[in-house]
Image (cartoon, rainbow, N blue to C red):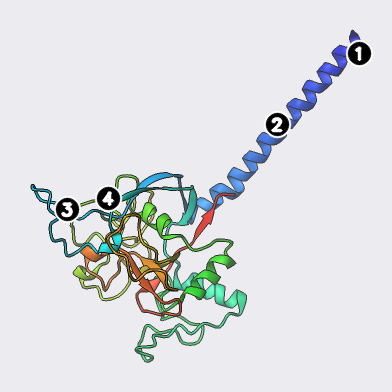
């Protein structure tokens, strides 16, 4: 009987020690990984959200003309997205320069339409005083390579839209009001990007900045039709979906649900990116 009690006590001690060890591991993970990640990334919980929009109808049920909504972003439908992390801000010039230096990657950050423009990079140097501005003139492979270097990836368009509009199907990151000046769109006539986070009202329900304005952003997604959409052509190519509005785009075209596409080799003075990361 005494031997049995000794064995039982040792078993409890070992089990208790194992439990404490597990708690310690969780503690270490949270404070050295999760909290560290939260400095530049935001956790987006998994769940359903409303993706896309419906064209409004009149009292007789007839669809009204809605010039600001494109058929490819209809109809509104619920979609489930697993939880993930996403960058709080768009990737900046200074961050991208560190990537180029660390990897010795050669990338031609020059506008192919205006090779003498003052916003072009000179070799590996961004324009003076614009270290905190979002990096632009990056093609898809540049953006993807940067994210992979950081142990991340580009977001899907579903992840991007959920981050922008939350669970309530809002039009813009900040809400449903058509208010000029909340974000860096064409209406304020700034004519260039601002430092990331410099428009504090352009913030999504998950506290992610610059999703309505500043610059447009690459996603990982190919251009595919929504379920039951009336648009049946133009899909299935090699183009990638780009999301978000920007300083050159009007507010109505900068809604969270608006979709644009471009070739992977495209470089544009208003096209940048941010990264995402799976939960591991």
Please report contact status of discs 2 and 4: CB closer than 8 Å, yes or no. Answer: no
Task: Give the percent coordinates (x, y) of residue 58.
Answer: 10, 51
Disc 1 from disc 2: Cα separation: 26 Å
Please report contact status of discs 1 and 3: CB closer than 8 Å, yes or no. Answer: no
Q: Which residue is mark 1?
A: 3
Q: How would you rate the neighbour count of disc 1 (Cα within 10 Å): few for under 14, some for 14-19, many for 20 or more?
A: few
Task: Give SS at disc 1.
Answer: helix
Task: Give SS at disc 2.
Answer: helix
**Relative to 179, does residue 1 appear above or below in the rendering?**
above
Q: What residue is rendered at 34% in x and 71% in y?
A: 234
Q: Residue furthest top?
A: 1
Which of the labelled discs sits on residue 20, or is there none? 2
Task: Tell me which numbered mark, 1 or 2, is placed earlier along the sequence.
Answer: 1
Task: Give SS at disc 4.
Answer: loop
Q: Residue furthest bottom?
A: 116
Disc 1 from disc 4: Cα separation: 67 Å
Q: Which residue is mark 3?
A: 56
**Relative to 20, does residue 93 appear above or below in the rendering?**
below
Front tag of 1 and 4: 4
Q: How would you rate the neighbour count of disc 4 (Cα within 10 Å): few for under 14, some for 14-19, many for 20 or more?
A: many
Front tag of 4 and 3: 3
Q: Which residue is mark 4?
A: 170
Disc 4 from disc 3: Cα separation: 15 Å
Snapshot quadrant of residue 267: bottom left
């Amino acid at each position: 009987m005494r031997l049995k009690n000794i064995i039982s006590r040792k078993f409890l001690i070992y089990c208790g020690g194992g439990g404490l060890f597990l708690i310690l591991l969780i503690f270490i993970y949270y404070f050295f990984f999760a909290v560290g990640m939260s400095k530049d990334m935001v956790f987006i919980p998994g769940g359903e959200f409303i993706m896309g929009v419906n064209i409004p109808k009149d009292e007789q049920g007839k669809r009204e003309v809605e010039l600001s909504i494109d058929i490819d972003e209809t109809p509104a439908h619920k979609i489930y997205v697993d939880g993930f992390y996403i960058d709080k801000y768009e990737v900046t010039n200074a961050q991208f320069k560190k990537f180029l230096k660390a990897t010795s990657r050669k990338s031609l950050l020059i506008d192919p339409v205006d090779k003498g423009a003052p916003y072009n990079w000179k070799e590996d140097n961004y324009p003076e005083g614009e270290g905190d501005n979002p990096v632009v003139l990056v093609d898809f492979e540049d953006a993807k390579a940067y994210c992979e270097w950081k142990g991340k990836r580009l977001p899907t368009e579903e992840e991007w839209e959920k981050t922008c509009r939350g669970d309530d199907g809002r039009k813009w990151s900040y809400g449903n009001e058509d208010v000029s000046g909340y974000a860096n769109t064409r209406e304020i006539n700034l004519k260039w990007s601002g430092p990331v986070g410099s428009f504090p009202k352009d913030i999504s329900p998950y506290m992610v900045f610059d999703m309505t304005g500043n610059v447009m952003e690459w996603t990982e997604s190919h251009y595919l039709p929504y379920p039951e959409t009336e648009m049946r052509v133009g899909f299935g190519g090699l183009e990638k979906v780009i999301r978000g509005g920007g300083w050159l785009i009007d507010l109505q075209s900068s809604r969270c649900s608006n979709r644009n596409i471009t070739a992977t080799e495209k470089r544009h003075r208003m096209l940048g990116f941010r990264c995402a990361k799976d939960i591991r």
